[in-house]
Amino acid sequence: MLLLPLFVSQFVLSALSITNLGLISSMVGFLHVQKYGPGYSVQVSSSESIQMKALPAHIWLDQGHTSNGVAGYGFFLGLLGMFIAFRYKKGKSTPTLVLVLTILLTLATLFTLSALIFTFTVTSQTKHKQITPSLLRAGEPYPDHRWTPETWYKAVLKLPIEESLKKTFRNKVRNMEAWRWMLIPIFLTDVVGLVLAGLALVGARKEKREVGGVDKGERYVDAR
């Protein structure tokens, strides 16, 4: 009876993961374009503007790589989980495969929890910082503080730059916030899947023992 909820949980895990993978990939593509682009003009005074580099000297990207790994792992794990649940329901799988799924979901839960803590910690450490216009140099990356892409572009939005750029950056910041918060439902889905897989494993082993006991009883009766 637990196999249908397990199948559904793995479908949800795969759907959430591929959605987050798309959001993170969009951010990566945007940052790649920004890195090799010309930057943008900042009006530092009424008579002076500076062509600012798009990315700062110290930007933290590890949380994005980690979250990308979580999303990729979750997507393929969800597909595998659906396959195992479907085959087991049809009687074409074994408790061993359910055990494998339980182990993989345990790893996924720990991996996602680590990424969740790391990402939110790094974001918290780098938020509420501001870009000091006097430190801006034409053609050079901003030298002060450490940033994540999200906190950097939130700070950039406070600078006097073109309104069209601000609109683009607002959309990208929402994108970055979305994939960060998406780690929470992915983690919860991992936990639900792990609990269901564990219960399904216990049930499958119990069923196997009962079937084995019946077979032994029948052989004993036949022998007599």
Image (cartoon, rainbow, N blue to C red):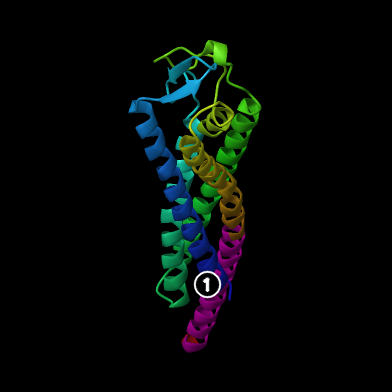
In the rendering, at what x and y percent does residue 23 appear?
46, 47
Q: Amino acid at mark 1?
A: Lys
Using the image as rendered, state which of residue 144 and residue 133 is in the foreground: 133
Q: Position of residue 218 (x, y in %)?
A: 50, 85
> As displayed, is residue 106 above or below residue 29?
below
Q: Is residue 151 left or right of residue 89?
A: right
For numbered disc 1, what is the local secondary structure?
helix
State the residue at coordinates (59%, 63%): 196
Residue 38 location (% of width, % of height): 35, 25
Quarter of the image with the N terminus in it: bottom right
Magenta-colored segment: predominant secondary structure: helix
Q: Which residue is mark 1?
A: 208
Give the image location of residue 87, x and y in percent. 42, 72
Q: Which residues are magenta?
A: 193-222
Query: Residue at the left extreme?
Result: 36
Where is 8 relative to 56, above or below? below
Describe residue 33's horizontal placement relative to residue 43 as left or right: left
Q: Residue at x 43, y 77 (%)?
A: 91
The reply to whether residue 209 is visible in this rendering is no
Q: Is residue 65 magenta?
A: no
User: Can residue 166 be seen here?
Assistant: yes
